[in-house]
């Protein structure tokens, strides 16, 4: 059965219309309170101020009869008034502010504290005037009933104390402080006195502090309220720095020992942290007899009775262990190391001494505490490496390092990622032992961990590939196959996330890879990925980062065929792409190419494709091109690039004549004026362009070096293949000789003395040439693989270029054929390398000479035999 559907017609009768009107009236009633909240004419009248009043008169009027929000505005504007008219502001505005602050709310009080501090920092008036006019207002509001306001005024006062003269501090602050620190005063007053005394300790001499401040310090250290004892204990560090080592030993240290045994956990915690911060001021006796027993008791109680100091103890443990390192016995050294290991895995495994029945579910607060402890252990890990000595890392700390890098909580792994570079530096030659953990952190599921690791990724990878030289090269080479998949995985995870800044940062750091891995690995695993990001990613900073990294990869690529392929793809897919967005990215890429490559390289491959964009149908592309034209022109050299200069001028004329977009035409005219003012560099060095020309020459030399290295590698491969062919021929010849008849054997035996000399001479000639070619290959090619990618600075690249080119020339001149000598062209400076055909001709001519010698000798022997027979 089908369900029965009832249709009702809409009724527009008069009664229904009145119903709709009543509903609308109800809606208006609901909106009435909103309308009533608007300002009434009377309120608007009270807020209106005469526009003819000056700034000072308006401020006085608003403070006298205005509302609170207007008064707060005047107080916030006080630094401006002090800059414009300090005398009138101090005479008329500041007294009004002083009156208003007695009854002002929290917002105006906080604003006043900030404004008074700004006036001090800007030095609008002298410090004497400031102390006379502002200091009393600060002291009056210091004990405000609101804690936030009181702290704001205290911060202002502490900043003022730094600038005040000693006499003013003594009369205005120190003398009233004696009465404020008494037990009869309020808790807030005594807490403020503690913080002020910590600041005053650095302003007076030691004898004044001993006479006037130390008695108050002792009194507050024995206060009945634990908040006061805690606050005073934290200020003992500043007081110790003011009174010196001797008084610290006799006065401060006994107080700290007593406070470390206080009944309040916060007091004990403050005493422990102050002890750690003052370790440098104690001598060896104090450390061994006083500090060390206290620290041991803290460590013992932290797990049993007083877990409140566990977080602080884990945070200061690295500093503590290294501060007490000189007085530790081997047993104590081992005990503190085991204590650190226990803290590093706290909350991850069952504690010793507990059975399953005693274990309870950890509360959320306990779990957070344990996470903080492990995070602090990760923070202190570099200090613990120093404590145990890097040589003992694998034996003592590697297991803890592994646990912290695989910790289930992100904050712990994040801290390990931040400190990973410090760990790698400390391990030095043993850095290869933590390669697996680097791969683990690169593949971490949290992008926060990856972002923390990427900050020092180039330095870490450099240490990974070069730091382990003392341990042998095998460990370094084996680490690369694991590293490359981890790097690609990290980039893909960053690309699929919404955190584009992490992706951008990662791509920028990946520009270091040419100094780490081989050119082929970069080409097949990273270079094409950069091009894909430029074409498909939607975030502009990410695209620019990928474009620059791609240019770096292209800069250090060693195969001309691969370079030409990448250049062609850049021109076709970006410069001639269908999307105007890709064409804009092509111009960005050209900027990076002009930055990284030589002028001749840009002019050879990219100059004309850039100029073609003057006919682009999109105005934004033409506009960006116009901004780029001055840089494009700076790449030209006269007279070599005269034809390119003519092409540039022709394109600019077309833009001036044919451009229809007003914005583009304006930029074209502005660019024309800038281009007219530019001076083009010539082929010869000029003083004004000396540094730029020198840098460009260095870039060009490195580019030619890559071409030379590629040619040398090809020659090495050809020589190796040719030597194998010669050996095969010799083997075949011996095999044929062994199968000859006995009759021929007799004739051969007669001609052996003469033929052997010729054959041996031919063999020695071939061997000597092959040895020379192999030595040339090994001398010229092996330094390439070890040094060409490790020249990020100019000096190393220059030295290396000169050395390699020198070897290349000396080895080239060792050949007898003139075709193997180097020739330099006037424009490019490329070295002319021997071709495969010329090398073949060389060997064929040598073989012909040897064969000719053999034939002549055999003829002579046959004639002698005939004469003897006759």
Image (cartoon, rainbow, N blue to C red):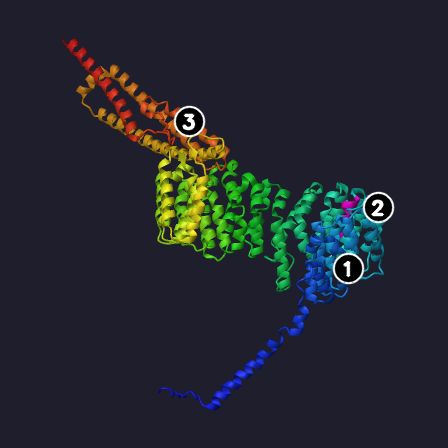
* Mark 1 or mark 2, whichever is nearer to me: 1
> Which residue is disc 2 drawn over?
208
* Mark 1 or mark 3, whichever is nearer to me: 1
> Which residue is disc 1 drawn over?
95
In front of the other: 231 or 109: 109
**Residue 827 lies in what quarter of the image?**
top left
Label 1: state its secondary structure.
helix
> Which residue is disc 3 drawn over?
807
Report how far apart the C-alphas of labels 1 and 3 lie in the structure: 85 Å
Report how far apart the C-alphas of labels 1 and 2 lie in the structure: 35 Å
Q: Is residue 129 visible?
A: yes
Decide: is 63 above or below 293: below
Q: Which mark is residue 121?
A: none
Q: Is residue 779 magenta?
A: no
Left or right of 573, for residue 436: right
Q: Which residues are drawn in magenta?
A: 234-243
Decide: is 804 above or below 676: above
Q: Is residue 235 magenta?
A: yes
* Mark 3 or mark 2, whichever is nearer to me: 2
């Amino acid at each position: 059965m089908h369900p029965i559907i009832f249709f009702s017609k809409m009724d527009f009768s008069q009664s229904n219309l009145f119903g709709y009107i009543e509903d609308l009236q109800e809606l208006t009633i609901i909106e009435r309170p909103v309308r009533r909240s608007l300002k009434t004419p009377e309120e608007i009248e009270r807020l209106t101020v005469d526009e003819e009043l000056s700034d000072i008169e308006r401020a006085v009027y608003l403070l006298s009869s205005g509302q609170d929000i207007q008064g707060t505005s005047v107080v916030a504007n006080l630094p401006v008034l002090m800059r414009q008219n300090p005398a009138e502001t101090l005479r008329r505005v500041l007294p009004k502010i002083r009156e208003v602050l007695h009854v002002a709310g929290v917002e105006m009080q906080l604003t006043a504290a900030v404004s008074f501090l700004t006036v001090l920092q800007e030095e609008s008036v002298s410090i004497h005037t400031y102390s006379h006019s502002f200091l009393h207002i600060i002291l009056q509001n210091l004990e405000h009933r609101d804690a936030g306001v009181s702290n704001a005024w205290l911060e202002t006062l502490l900043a003022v104390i730094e600038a005040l003269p000693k006499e003013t501090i003594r009369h205005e602050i120190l003398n009233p402080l004696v009465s404020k620190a008494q037990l009869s005063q309020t808790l807030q007053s005594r807490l403020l006195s503690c913080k002020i005394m910590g600041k005053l300790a650095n302003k007076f001499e030691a004898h004044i502090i001993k006479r006037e401040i130390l008695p108050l310090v002792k009194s507050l250290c024995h206060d009945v309220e634990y908040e006061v004892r805690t606050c005073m204990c934290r200020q003992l560090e500043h007081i110790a720095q003011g009174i010196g080592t001797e008084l610290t030993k006799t006065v401060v240290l006994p107080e700290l020992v007593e406070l470390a045994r206080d009944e309040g956990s916060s007091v004990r915690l403050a005493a422990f942290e102050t002890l750690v911060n003052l370790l440098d001021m104690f001598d060896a006796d104090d450390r061994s007899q006083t500090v060390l027993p206290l620290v041991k008791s803290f460590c013992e109680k932290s797990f049993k009775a007083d877990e409140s100091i566990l977080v602080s103890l884990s945070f200061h443990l690295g500093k503590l262990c290294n501060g007490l390192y000189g007085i530790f016995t081997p047993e104590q050294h081992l005990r503190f190391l085991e204590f650190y290991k226990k803290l590093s895995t706290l909350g991850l495994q069952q504690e010793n001494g507990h059975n399953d029945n005693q274990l309870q579910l950890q509360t959320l607060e306990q779990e957070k505490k344990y996470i903080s402890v492990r995070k602090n252990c990760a923070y202190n890990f570099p200090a613990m490496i120093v404590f145990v000595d890097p040589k003992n890392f694998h034996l003592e700390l590697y297991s803890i390092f592994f646990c912290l890098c695989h910790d289930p909580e992100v904050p712990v792994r994040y801290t390990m990622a931040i400190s990973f570079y410090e760990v790698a530096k400390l391990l030095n030659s043993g850095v290869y032992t933590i390669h697996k953990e680097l791969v683990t952190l690169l593949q971490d599921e949290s992008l926060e961990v990856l972002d923390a690791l990427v900050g020092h990724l180039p330095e870490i990878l450099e240490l990974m590939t070069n730091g382990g030289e003392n341990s042998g090269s095998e460990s370094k080479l084996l680490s690369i196959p694991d590293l490359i998949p981890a790097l690609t995985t990290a980039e893909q995870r960053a690309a699929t996330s919404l955190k584009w800044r992490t992706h951008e940062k990662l791509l920028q750091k990946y520009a270091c890879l040419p100094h780490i891995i081989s050119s082929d690995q970069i080409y097949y695993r990273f270079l094409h990925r950069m091009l894909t990001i430029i074409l498909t990613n939607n975030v502009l900073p990410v695209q620019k980062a990928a474009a620059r990294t791609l240019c770096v990869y292209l800069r250090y690529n060693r195969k001309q065929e691969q370079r030409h392929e990448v250049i062609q793809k850049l021109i076709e897919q970006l410069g001639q792409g269908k999307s105007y967005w890709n064409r804009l990215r092509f111009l960005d890429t050209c900027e990076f190419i002009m930055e990284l490559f030589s002028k001749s390289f840009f002019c050879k491959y990219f100059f004309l494709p850039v100029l073609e964009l003057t006919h682009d149908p999109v105005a934004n592309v033409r506009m960006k091109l116009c901004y780029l034209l001055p840089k494009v022109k700076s790449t030209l050299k006269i007279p070599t690039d005269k034809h390119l200069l003519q092409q540039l001028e022709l394109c600019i004329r077309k833009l001036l004549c044919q451009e229809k977009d007003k914005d583009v035409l304006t930029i074209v005219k502005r660019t024309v004026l800038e281009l007219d003012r530019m001076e083009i560099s010539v082929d010869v060095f000029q003083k004004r362009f000396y540094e730029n020309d020198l840098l460009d020459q260095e870039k060009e030399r490195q580019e030619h070096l890559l071409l030379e290295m590629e040619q040398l590698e090809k020659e090495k491969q050809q020589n190796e293949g040719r030597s194998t062919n010669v050996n095969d021929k010799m083997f075949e010849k011996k095999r044929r000789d062994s199968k000859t008849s006995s009759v021929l054997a007799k004739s051969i035996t007669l001609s052996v003395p003469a033929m052997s000399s010729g054959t041996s001479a031919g063999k020695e000639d071939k061997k000597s040439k092959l040895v020379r070619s192999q030595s040339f290959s090994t001398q010229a090619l092996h330094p390439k693989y070890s040094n060409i990618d490790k020249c990020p600075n100019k000096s190393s690249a220059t030295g290396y270029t000169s050395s390699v080119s020198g070897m290349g020339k000396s080895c080239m001149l060792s050949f007898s054929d003139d075709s193997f000598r180097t020739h330099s062209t006037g424009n490019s400076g490329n070295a002319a390398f021997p071709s495969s055909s010329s090398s073949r001709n060389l060997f064929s001519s040598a073989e012909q000479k040897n064969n000719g010698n053999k034939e002549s000798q055999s003829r002579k022997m046959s004639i002698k035999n005939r004469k003897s027979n006759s």
